[in-house]
Image: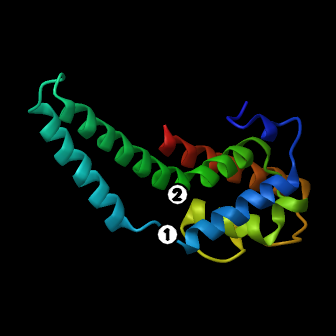
């Protein structure tokens, strides 16, 4: 069972999966500023050092603790925005991908190409076979390609653990 019950192997909502792929691609076009993440992390560390010097009864302790938590929340938001759609899409692919039908739509293939192989474009090369929108495969190729993409997605998901 995946983390998202709506995407379990019993009911694959193709519109939802295509939307996840499109949102992932859109999030890639507006990357999170690494400088902002670095600054937030530095401020958290600085405030943690200050907090360690204060007594818990000091009113300043609570104020700094709140600021640390606010910065951590902001950092989590930035990080989850980067990986949320990616993880949901990978879960759906790992459990349900079949190299036919809507799975071979341009946004899904383009997102998978970027996530799994770090490349751009809507064509994948799996097991020396080109996977493009509307490609028809033999039964053997369908199985091999589908399983290879599922395995690649599972491997990528391990990075989230």
Residue count near mark 2 (Cα–Cα under 10 Å), binned few <14, some 14–19, many ≥20: some
- Above or below: residue 143 compared with residue 39: above
List x then y, in percent, for residue 64.
24, 40
Residue count near mark 1 (Cα–Cα under 10 Å), binned few <14, some 14–19, many ≥20: few
Instruction: Name the foreground residue: 136 vs 102.
Output: 102
List x then y, in percent, for residue 144.
76, 52
Q: Residue furthest top?
A: 57
Side (left or right) of 60 relative to 81: left
Residue at the image position 75 percent from the left and 64 percent from the top = 108
- Above or below: residue 148 compared with residue 26: above
- Above or below: residue 152 compared with residue 122: above
Q: Can see residue 32?
A: yes
Question: SS for tag 1?
Answer: loop
Residue position for label 1: 31
List x then y, in percent, for residue 117.
56, 64
Instruction: Name the foreground residue: 108 vs 43.
Output: 43
Residue 116, picture quadrant: bottom right
Which comes before the other along the chain, label 1 or label 2? Answer: 1
Instruction: Name the foreground residue: 99 vs 32.
Output: 32
Residue 34, picture quadrant: bottom left
Q: Which mark is residue 61?
A: none
Residue 154, picture quadrant: top right
Do callouts 1 and 2 mark residues in contact (Cβ within 8 Å)? Answer: yes
Q: Can see residue 128?
A: no
Residue position for label 2: 82
Q: Total label count? A: 2
Side (left or right) of 133 relative to 127: right
Residues at marks 1 and 2, CA–CA distance in whole angstroms: 8 Å
List x then y, in percent, for residue 17.
79, 54
């Amino acid at each position: 069972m995946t983390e998202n019950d709506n995407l379990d192997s019993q009911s694959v909502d193709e519109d939802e999966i295509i939307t996840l792929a499109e949102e992932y691609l859109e999030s890639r076009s507006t990357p999170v500023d690494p400088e902002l993440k670095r600054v937030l992390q530095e401020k958290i560390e600085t405030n943690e050092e200050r907090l360690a010097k204060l007594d818990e009864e000091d009113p300043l302790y609570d104020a700094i603790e709140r600021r640390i938590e606010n910065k951590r929340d902001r950092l989590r938001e930035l990080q989850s925005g980067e990986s949320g759609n990616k993880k949901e899409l990978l879960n759906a692919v790992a459990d349900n991908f079949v190299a036919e039908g809507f799975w071979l739509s341009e946004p899904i293939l383009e997102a998978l190409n970027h996530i799994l192989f770090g490349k751009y474009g809507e064509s994948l090369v799996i097991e020396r076979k080109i996977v493009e929108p509307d490609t028809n495969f033999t039964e053997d190729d369908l199985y091999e390609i589908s399983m290879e993409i599922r395995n690649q997605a599972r491997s990528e998901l391990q990075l989230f653990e």
